[in-house]
Every structure is written in structure tokens, then in C-alpha cells.
């Protein structure tokens, strides 16, 4: 297990238990206690947890992993998903790229394999990656900055998106189940994603397999709203089959 994946799992345990102990984590991940201490120090520096004697707690802290940690987790899978998603960006397309670590990989693929397109995004890091490319017209919708994701959210963002009509939206989610649908960590982000779906003729969901089978805190769309799911080959076949039965086209890379 990579360090980034281990730290994400520590955050998940903190969400469930509210506190963790170094000895238990050391046994769970089969690493030295000093390694766990370094993990906890890194997460404390990023504002995720508060270290205690012999462990850590999330009392009074955010429980969303920092963007840098999320970006490194399952990076190879996300890169493959991003490259596959690029195949659905045609010359002259009008698209929305949602904020997220997997959708960022689509932006990086688009940057490396230049083609003409109009891109709307609420993600500052995605806008910066694509800035200065003459083939692309970039619109950044306004709103309130979410520092944990570097996205702009809120009523102003929703109003701005309502003025657009695009051929495709490349969407992110923090959890997906056939029954619950698409989930995210808060209602503000959920409302923005709903506005993105309404603005697009086609909805393409980009998520790595770790998101499948998890329910996000807030549901923002049923699976029937999704036209295509691009994920990796590690996805649970049972979940993939259930999603496919709902009429979603699925590609695994």
C-alpha cells in the first residue's frame, strides 16, 4: 500500500471512529509505528486531524482529505481514466470539466494532446493547467472558493452554469452505488454538480474503482442521469453489472 493510500484509509477510519491509536494503525497496515507517526504529522500539518498522546482525533477538524493526498491515491488508474475520457472530446466540442482528481487527469491529457474545444470549469487547478493553450477557450464560473478542492461553489456558480449549454460534462463523485446514485461530501457541491448535469447533453462520470459501492454524504443524481461511466479494471463486477442494468455504458481501463 502506498503512503497516500494509507493516509486516506486513516482518514476513513477517523470518520468512522473519531479517534485512532498509533499501535492499532501500525498493526493494521503492517508498518512501523514511526511510519504512522509521520503519517499523522503530515495529516495534522494539512489540517485534517489533531494528534494526541498515542494517536489522533478529528474533533473540531475537517474530515475531507487534502487535495494533494487525494491526487496521489490511485494515480495510475486515474491517469488511464483521464486518457480514455479524452477520446470523447471531439474537435470543436463544448464541454464542462468538473473539479476532482480524476477529472484533472482529463485536463492533463487534453493539455498533452491538444485539440480545439471550449471548456467550462469550476476548478481553479484545472483552469490553470489549461491556461495559455491557443486551441482552448476557457470559461471559469464564479462562486465561493472551496479550499479543500480548489473549486468554486455556491448559488453564483449554479446561476452561471444555468447559462451554458454543452455537449458533455465530465463529472466527478466521491461515492457511487446503483441504489443511492452519485454522492458528494456536501450540499453546496451537490447543487453545482446538479447544475452541470442540467447544462449537458451527455453525462460522463470519471471515477476510480474505490468510489464504487460507497455512498457520498449527499446524493446529487440517480444513476439513470449518467450516460457513460469510465472506471478502472479493479471495480467490483457485481456493482458494475448492477450499474450496467440501469442503462449506463461502462468502460474499464
Image (cartoon, rainbow, N blue to C red):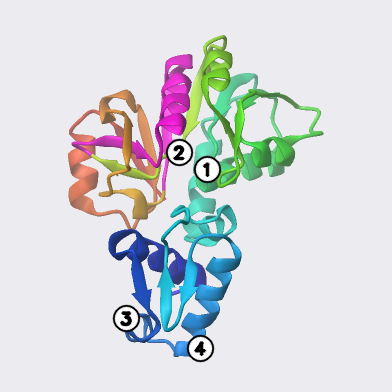
> Could you tell which of marks 3 and 1 lies nearer the N-terminus?
3
Q: Residues within 10 Å of mark 3 (few under 14, many from 20)?
A: few
Q: Which mark is residue 100?
A: 1
Q: Height in image: 149 above or below 41? A: above
Residue 159 falls in image quadrant: top right
| Mark 2 vs mark 4, CA separation in Å | 35 Å
Which region is colored magenta? 178-207
User: Residues at badges 2 and 1 in contact (C-beta under 8 Å)?
Assistant: yes
| Nearest to N terminus: mark 3 or mark 2 | 3
Of the two numbered discs 2 and 1 on the same chain, state the one appearing first in sequence: 1
Q: Is disc 2 in contact with disc 4, using a CB cutoff of under 8 Å?
A: no
Residue 112, given in percent of the width and then of the height, sits at: 70, 44
Which is closer to the viewer, label 3 or label 2? 3
Q: Is residue 50 shown in magenta?
A: no
Question: Secondary structure beneath disc 4?
Answer: helix
What secondary structure is marked by label 3?
helix
Mark 3 to mark 2 CA distance (whole Å): 30 Å
First reached walking from the N terminus: tag 1 or tag 4? 4
Amino acid at each position: 500500500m502506498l503512503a497516500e493510500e494509507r493516509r486516506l484509509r486513516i482518514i476513513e477510519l477517523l470518520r468512522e471512529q473519531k479517534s485512532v491509536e498509533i499501535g492499532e494503525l501500525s498493526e493494521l497496515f503492517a508498518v512501523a509505528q514511526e511510519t504512522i507517526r509521520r503519517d499523522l504529522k503530515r495529516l495534522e500539518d494539512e489540517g485534517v486531524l489533531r494528534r494526541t498522546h498515542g494517536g489522533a482525533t478529528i474533533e473540531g477538524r475537517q474530515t475531507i482529505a487534502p487535495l494533494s493526498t487525494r491526487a496521489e491515491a490511485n494515480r495510475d488508474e486515474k491517469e488511464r481514466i483521464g486518457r480514455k475520457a479524452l477520446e470523447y472530446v471531439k474537435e470543436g466540442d463544448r464541454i464542462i470539466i468538473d473539479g476532482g482528481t480524476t477529472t484533472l487527469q482529463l485536463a492533463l491529457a487534453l493539455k498533452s494532446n491538444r485539440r480545439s474545444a471550449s471548456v467550462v470549469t469550476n476548478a481553479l487547478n484545472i483552469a490553470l493547467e489549461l491556461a495559455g493553450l491557443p486551441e482552448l477557450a476557457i470559461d471559469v464560473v464564479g462562486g465561493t472558493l472551496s479550499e479543500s478542492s480548489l473549486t468554486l461553489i455556491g448559488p453564483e456558480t449554479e446561476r452561471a452554469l444555468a447559462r451554458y449549454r454543452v455537449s458533455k460534462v465530465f463529472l466527478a463523485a466521491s461515492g457511487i452505488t446503483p441504489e443511492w446514485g452519485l454522492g458528494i461530501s456536501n450540499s453546496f457541491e451537490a447543487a453545482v454538480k446538479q447544475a452541470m448535469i442540467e447544462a449537458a447533453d451527455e453525462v460522463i462520470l470519471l471515477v476510480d474503482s474505490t468510489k464504487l459501492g460507497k455512498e457520498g454524504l449527499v446524493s446529487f443524481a440517480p444513476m439513470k442521469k449518467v450516460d457513460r461511466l469510465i472506471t478502472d479494471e479493479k471495480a467490483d463486477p457485481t456493482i458494475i453489472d448492477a450499474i450496467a442494468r440501469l442503462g449506463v455504458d461502462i468502460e474499464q481501463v
